[in-house]
Structure formats: structure tokens, C-alpha cells
């Protein structure tokens, strides 16, 4: 599982220049084999590289998903980051984040740090 995907490299000043697809390879994981991608919220600093994880089921809070798929999308939502996923009707589980119970995940943040982290019962990354 990957939690948040960070900015698209080069999209904003200070964005990480490492494509997300390259990071799982450091752990001998192919990005096509990632089963789940959890998104904490719909901003570009969390969803910019979502398209890389084509085979992963998207786990996202229902409120965020409703905001992305609204017409027009809610202000501040990175609708472009989800466009391909929506158009191709890829698997999405839009639920309250409480459903993201105790899991071991790979957290990717916009600064390029990654670490194993646990998710508490409320969906927060510890």
C-alpha cells in the first residue's frame, strides 16, 4: 500500500524530482503490483502522482471523493490527478477513513521521504 503520492515532479517549486514509480523499486516492488493507494485528502501535494498506480485500488474518504467527482469539482481538489482513474472506472473504495484500520504502509510525502508507518483506527498515519 502506498499512502499519498506527492506532487508531480516539477509541478511546483520545491517538488520532489523523484518519480513515485521509481521509489517502490528501491524495495524490489513494481508499482504495477501495488494493491492499494490511500489518499489522505484531495490536494495536489497528496495526489499528484496517483496515475502511476494504475492497478491499485484507491482508498479515499467519501467526502473527498464526492468533492472530486462533483460538477464542478470542489475548489482546491486536484481533479486532474484523478481524471484518468475516473474515465477508466478503476476501482475506488470511498469510505470514512475509519475503515483504514491498522495496516503497514509505505508513506510517501511531498519532500520525498518514505518510511514504513502504521495507520491508527482513525485513519491517521502514525
Image: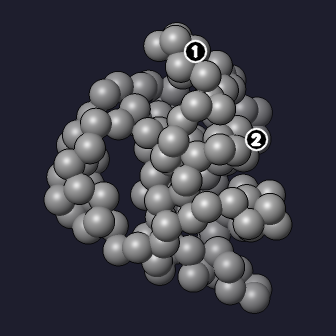
Left or right for 64, reference 121? right
Residue 73 in the image, given as x and y percentages of width and height: 70, 80
Residue at 46% from the left image edge and 52% from the top image edge? 38
Q: Residue at x 31, y 28 (%)?
A: 116
Tell me if 36 is positioned left or right of 123 in this view: right
Q: Position of residue 107 (x, y in %)?
A: 40, 35
Dot 1 crowding, Cα within 10 Å, few <14, some 14–19, many 20+: few
Crowding around mark 2 (Cα neighbors within 10 Å: few <14, some 14 to 19, many 20+) is few
How far is the residue under mark 1 from the one under mark 2?
23 Å
- On the image, numbered disc 2 is attached to which residue? 11
Q: Is residue 37 above or below residue 86?
A: above
Percent position (x, y) of residue 58? Answer: 54, 57
Image point (51%, 42%), residue name: 35
Label 1 or label 2, whichever comes before in sequence order: 2
Residue at image coords 28%, 36%: 104
Q: Position of residue 33 (x, y in %)?
A: 58, 31
Residue 63 drawn above or below residue 9 = below
Which of the numbered marks, if any, corresponds to residue 12? none
SS assignment at label 2: loop
Pick the quarter of the image with the C terminus. Answer: top left
Res. 11 image quadrant = top right
Q: Against 67, is 106 above or below?
A: above
What is the quadrant of residue 106 in the picture?
top left
Visible residue check, residue 20: no
Image quarter (top left, top right, bottom left or bottom right) of the N terminus:
top left
Q: Nearer the viewer, mark 1 or mark 2?
A: 1
Q: Is residue 124 visible?
A: yes
The residue that mark 1 highlights is 25
Q: Are marks 1 and 2 in contact (CB under 8 Å)?
A: no
Vertical arrangement, residue 58 with respect to residue 5, above or below: below
Q: Nearer the viewer, residue 63 or 31?
A: 31
Q: What's the colour scheme? A: one colour
Amino acid at each position: 500500500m502506498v499512502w499519498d503520492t506527492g506532487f508531480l515532479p516539477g509541478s511546483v517549486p520545491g517538488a520532489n524530482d523523484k518519480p513515485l514509480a521509481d521509489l517502490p523499486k528501491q524495495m524490489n516492488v513494481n508499482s504495477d503490483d501495488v494493491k492499494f493507494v490511500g489518499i489522505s485528502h484531495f490536494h495536489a501535494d497528496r495526489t499528484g502522482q496517483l496515475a502511476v498506480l494504475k492497478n491499485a485500488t484507491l482508498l479515499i474518504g467519501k467526502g473527498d471523493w464526492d468533492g472530486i467527482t462533483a460538477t464542478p469539482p470542489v475548489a482546491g481538489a486536484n481533479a486532474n490527478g484523478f481524471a484518468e482513474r475516473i474515465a477508466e472506472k478503476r476501482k475506488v473504495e470511498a469510505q470514512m477513513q475509519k475503515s483504514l484500520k491498522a495496516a503497514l504502509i509505505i508513506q510517501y510525502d511531498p519532500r520525498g521521504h518514505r518510511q514504513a508507518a502504521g495507520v491508527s483506527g482513525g485513519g491517521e498515519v502514525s
